Amino acid sequence: MTLSEIQQQLRRLPSVDELLRHPLLAPLAGTGARPLLVESAREVIGSIRAQIRSGQASPPLEEIATRIQQSFQQRQRPNLRPVINATGVIINTNLGRAPLSQEALQAIAEVAQGYSNLEYELEEGERGQRHTHVRPLLRELTGAEDALVTNNNAAAVLLVLSALAPGREVIISRGQLVEIGGGFRVPDVMRQSGARLVEVGTTNRTRLGDYANAMSAETALLLSVHPSNFLITGFTESAPLSALAELAHSQGLLAVEDLGSGCLIDSAHFGLAHEPMPQESIAAGADVVCFSGDKLLGGPQAGIILGKREIIARIAKHPLMRTIRIDKLTLAGLEATLRHYQRNEAPERIPIWRMIALPQETLRQRAQQWMMQLRSRGVIAELLEGQSTIGGGSLPSETLPSTLLAIHEEASTSYPSLEALAKRLRSGDPPIVARILRDRLLLDPRTVLPEQDQMLLDGLRAALAPESSA
Ligand SMILES: *Cc1c(COP(=O)(O)O)cnc(C)c1O
């Protein structure tokens, strides 16, 4: 285009007011969302101006209006929204950890919709405690004398140490000074609580005698932290919790365990290593055990503290308790999740356990269906034997056999690289998160919820299509 043609095109661009009278936009222009629509129109006109200046012709009015409508919708889209997890990592912290059961969702919706007896004793008509909604269940499921719940397990650990060991010594094995991720480092949390860290043993070996030698008049408790996201193998030794508890009690001290995951059913029944269970820690004599609500428990984000009655009472009185209290929606979801364990239906009802329990044959059939559907639309995909993982600081290095859908680098010429394809998938609606292994993009059916199958296939087709606008 010549300079004067460019100037002419720029002059002919419709004004914002004209555009808002277009039939696609007029109904929105009369609502409270008009300012947002005006912003969208300005943005689109701005980008069209730049296009014209770089020598491209102006699009027709119809297309400009459509682009404004799309930009407007984009601005309305929630920032936090569902994604399809095709990574095969079941408890994916970055993707929100445990999806909730239908019953948990329903319980949350019902409590959220109106008022509830959150802190109200219905029988007496007086003030109550929010913990009472899950306390009996937690006692029944774990054998603990008493229980408390917090916002998450990191908060639970901080609270327990702040209440039980301020200004005093806490003895811990060097092999357990772990970092969980997201900046949660056990030594830092201990310091924050005002407790003094006393490290004993070595990275790979800590004996009961190491704890015994370190105990003094300053000691408040012995702390055991489950190494939940790594393995130390080979020449290793650690003191069993029961021995630690016995040693602590012999000197009038406490034994506390941060268990991490909160696995209430035996993971060994699902072809996995045995993840230590809260009921085992209670039986071993721990005075306090804490763990997450949204790891292998399969519920909402929460911290659960179990323990002896008088110790839990001391913890409950600490001022931090109020700052990290569990919210009512979480509490509703947590109670509904715990009820699944009470009815012995966790593997059928709780999504993460359903995923763990999926037989490989079912996974193979699903991956095969995906493959056929894609092939019928000209997308070359193949099946590949692979592994799903548990993730989220639970059962490190344990895998479950799965059948993956693999899209080869050369399956389509419409994207420059697998990274570009993965990015297109992530920018879809809903976004799809996959993994890349060498020259293939891999999608694991284990973590894709059954009701997401069609969305996944639509998303894949859109991302692989030559005309994809993503
Ligand atoms: C995950 C984990 C935590 C933190 O729990 P959140 O619920 O994520 O706050 C603390 N300790 C251990 C051992 C863990 O595995």
Image (cartoon, grey):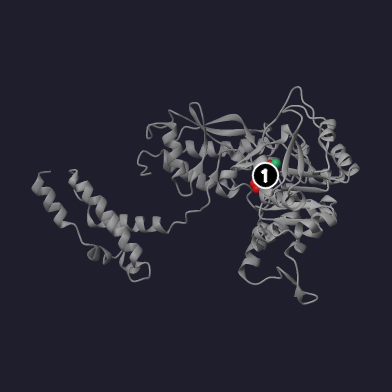
Residue located farthest toward the top when viewing the structure as drawn: 235
Q: How many marks?
A: 1
Q: Quadrant of residue 401?
A: top right
Front in this rendered view, residue 107 or 257: 257
Residue that appears at 75% across and 48% down: 290
Q: Quadrant of residue 151?
A: bottom right
Residue 140 vs 21, above or below: the answer is above
Q: Where does ligand 1 appear, by image quarter? A: top right
Residue located farthest toward the front when viewing the structure as drawn: 217
Front in this rendered view, residue 310 or 143: 310
Residue 59 vs 241, above or below: the answer is below
Label 1: few (<14), some (14–19) or many (≥20) C-alpha neighbours in 10 Å: some
Q: Is residue 333 left or right of residue 241?
A: left
Residue that appears at 76% across and 42% down: 170
Name the quarter where the N terminus is drawn: top left
Q: Is residue 1 left or right of residue 248?
A: left
Name the quarter where the C terminus is drawn: top left
Q: Is mark 1 within 8 Å of ligand 1?
A: no
Residue that appears at 44% across and 46% down: 428
On the image, the x and y values in percent for residue 32 come to 38, 70
Q: Is residue 206 visible?
A: yes
Q: Is residue 103 visible?
A: no
Residue located farthest toward the right when viewing the structure as drawn: 250
The three-letter code of the residue at mark 1 reads: Arg
On the image, the x and y values in percent for residue 195 come to 72, 46
On the image, the x and y values in percent for residue 341 come to 77, 52
On the image, the x and y values in percent for residue 155 come to 67, 51
The residue wearing badge 1 is 191
Q: Secondary structure at mark 1?
A: helix
Front in this rendered view, residue 414 or 123: 123
Residue located farthest toward the bottom when viewing the structure as drawn: 125
Q: Is residue 324 left or right of residue 40?
A: right
